[in-house]
Amino acid sequence: MSLIERAVREKIVLVGVTLPAPGEPAGPSEAETERHLDELELLVGTAGADVVGRVHQRRDRPDPATYIGHGKAQDLRSISETADADTVVFDDELSPAQSRNLEKILGRTAIDRTAVILDIFAQNARSEEGKAQVELAQLRYRLPRLRGRGHELSQQAGRIGTRGPGETQLEVDRRRLVRRVHKLESELNQLERRRRLQRQGRRRSRVASVSLVGYTNAGKSTLLNNLTGAGVAADERPFATLDPRTRRFALPGGEPVLLTDTVGFVRKLPHQLVEAFHSTLEVVNEADLLVHLVDTSAPDPEGQIDAVRAVLDEIGAGGIPEVLVFNKADLAPSVAQDLALRYPAAIVISAATGQGIDLLLAAVAHQLRASAHVVELSIPYARGDVLAALHREGEVLTTVDGEQATTVRAKLAGAALAQFAPFITVSADDDGAGSDAGATSEEGMERGDLHQDRAVPASRTLARGVGQ
């Protein structure tokens, strides 16, 4: 379902419009618009076409009919004819009406950045789920853009002799696409249920989950290969990775971690893709920690940081702890160091050469350990319910059988400490915590509250918010 013809290298003219930002009369600069067009040219090249010209315009507001105004559209037609362009691509999203009006004036196809990104996703989708998600996004994009192709697709004329022949072709096409959308949504719901069962199994394993996020082509797959030896393809092109890939590896202290490489983000990421890839992006929402990679060799690294964080907020992952990592320091060492000065908590690495990987692993381990506490508990043999609950709510590290009780060393989230406070004897984080905890009354435990579904423990609530 390609939106760009690849039988031959299609010729493309790019169009960028500088508009004032809300609350900022000056708005973005023309240089910023040119950077966006540079990125759009890279996307067009990835889709299999060649850029033969650019048009830039500054406006106070988009024209409702043609986005750039009728006069500018006429100029664009002349430029396209001179360059023998097949298609005109706008950096901003066009409404269906604007796209139709432009095609009438230009005499050629007019599409937007969204169509190009959807085309690239369609090329790179490999798994059953990925293909279904891309097709659903494309159909949602195309449905409002269905338009008649002459009299045979026009509405019923209603004249004598023309009434009642049945549906027009336009109506048949629209209904067929709607049925396909519903079928894809049903298939993806089934796949999401399967993925949810997999997530539940991973949560029961008590292994921390770390997701690699970042702008497309930031080096996430290269870092996954460096840390886990996954051997996945790490192509230097946008959106080479669509399906999440998870590998297990151990931190320097021996703690196991599930590391997931996710789809890259981009400015103006189409909302159709965010909606269609909801189940895939859930792997980010369920992570305990995000490793946010930034390409320091890119023209606008800080703009990419803002773009990624905007998408994270959109999918509900803005509150997950993050380690900011400036990658490709071997390609732009001075830029990496300048960024490190502006972001003191960030780590500078090169996933390709291994530079700074030890510092990154130390930062990841520190962040994960900061959210958990290692404690020692004394659990009487008669309280098997407490031991079972401990296995559910925390990570049991060691057990030693004594004369009257089992001594357990376990890792607990902060909110779970209160639940097991009557049995805590030593806290590895604070040796004094054990005496205070031990002084807590065992009344609640003696009532067998661990077996009741009264109040959900705060730790489980947190896990549910992150993991589901």
Image (cartoon, rainbow, N blue to C red):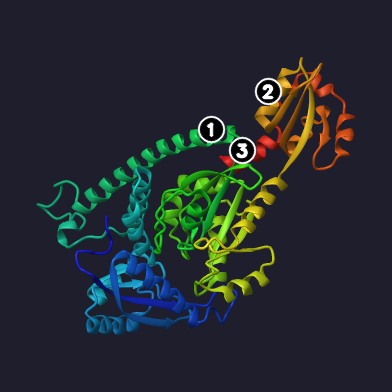
Nearer the camera: disc 3 or disc 2 = 2
Residue 228 screen position, x and y as percent: 51, 48
Residue 90 screen position, x and y as percent: 37, 72
Does residue 112 appear anywhere in the picture? Answer: no
What's the distance in space between the residues labelled 3 and 1, CA to CA?
Answer: 13 Å
Q: What residue type is disc 2 on?
A: Ala
Q: Which residue is mark 3?
A: 464
Sequence order check: which comes first, mark 3 or mark 1? 1
* Residue 358 vs residue 372, the one in the foreground: 358
Residue 361 screen position, x and y as percent: 62, 53
277 is higher (above) or lower (below) than 437: below
* Residue 389 vs residue 233, the one in the foreground: 233
* Residue 135 vs residue 78, the one in the foreground: 135
Determine the secondary structure under disc 3: helix
Q: What residue do we see at 66% from left, 35% from top?
A: 460
* Residue 362 vs residue 22, the one in the foreground: 362
Q: Which residue is mark 2?
A: 388
Q: What residue type is disc 3 on?
A: Arg
Q: What residue type is disc 1 on?
A: Gly
Q: Quadrant of the C terminus?
A: top right
